[in-house]
Image (cartoon, helix red, strand yellow):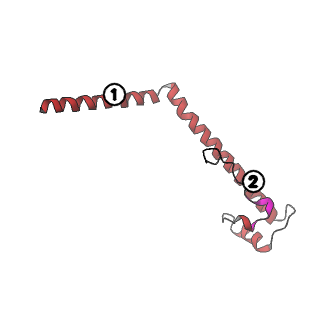
Amino acid sequence: MRRMFWLALGATVGVLVVRKLTATAKAYTPEGVAQGLSGLGEGLREMAAVVKESMAQRDAELRLALGVDEGEMDVETARQLIDRPSAELRDRDLPAGLRAPQPPVTPGGRAR
């Protein structure tokens, strides 16, 4: 009875180890590496788009606060933008042209 238990346990562990090694070996094939990198590239493109959008919004806020572009901003909001550039301002504090655009939502409910 004991021998049957240890035989079954050894066979189960052996199958699991072989499956894990096969999956790991497949990940290092050219197809596996390409599959892993495709997800990375998509994530980097998404991050670059968000950074670019944020930079444009921040640039517009500063240009308006410094009077480079035409537009109206109350003195206190302009002072906050200049004194604390990393502070978050609520959209209601900004003129309509500087409000953050809402990202499009995919059918899965995830923002692009």
Q: Nearer the viewer, residue 28 or 97?
A: 97
Which residue is at a point 46% across and 30% down the rendered structure image? Answer: 27
The residue singled out by tag 1 in the image is 18
What span is colored magenta in the figure? 93-102
Residue 9: x and y, percent? 22, 33
**Displayed quadrant of residue 90:** bottom right
The residue tagged 2 is 56
Residue 46: % across, % down: 64, 44
Task: State left or right for residue 9 relative to residue 109.
Answer: left
Residue at x-position 57% and y-position 39%: 40
Q: Secondary structure at mark 2?
A: helix
**In the image, what residue occupies the spot 65% across and 41% down?**
45
| Element marked by disc 1 | helix
**Amino acid on which disc 2 is placed:** Ala
In the picture as drawn, the residue positioned furthest to the left comes out as: 1
Label 2, label 1: how many angstroms apart (C-alpha)? 52 Å
* Residue toward you, 62 or 98: 98
Sequence-first disc among 2 and 1: 1
Residue positioned 72% across, 57% down in the render: 100
Residue found at the very far right of the displayed protein: 70
Quadrant of the rendered structure where residue 96 is?
bottom right
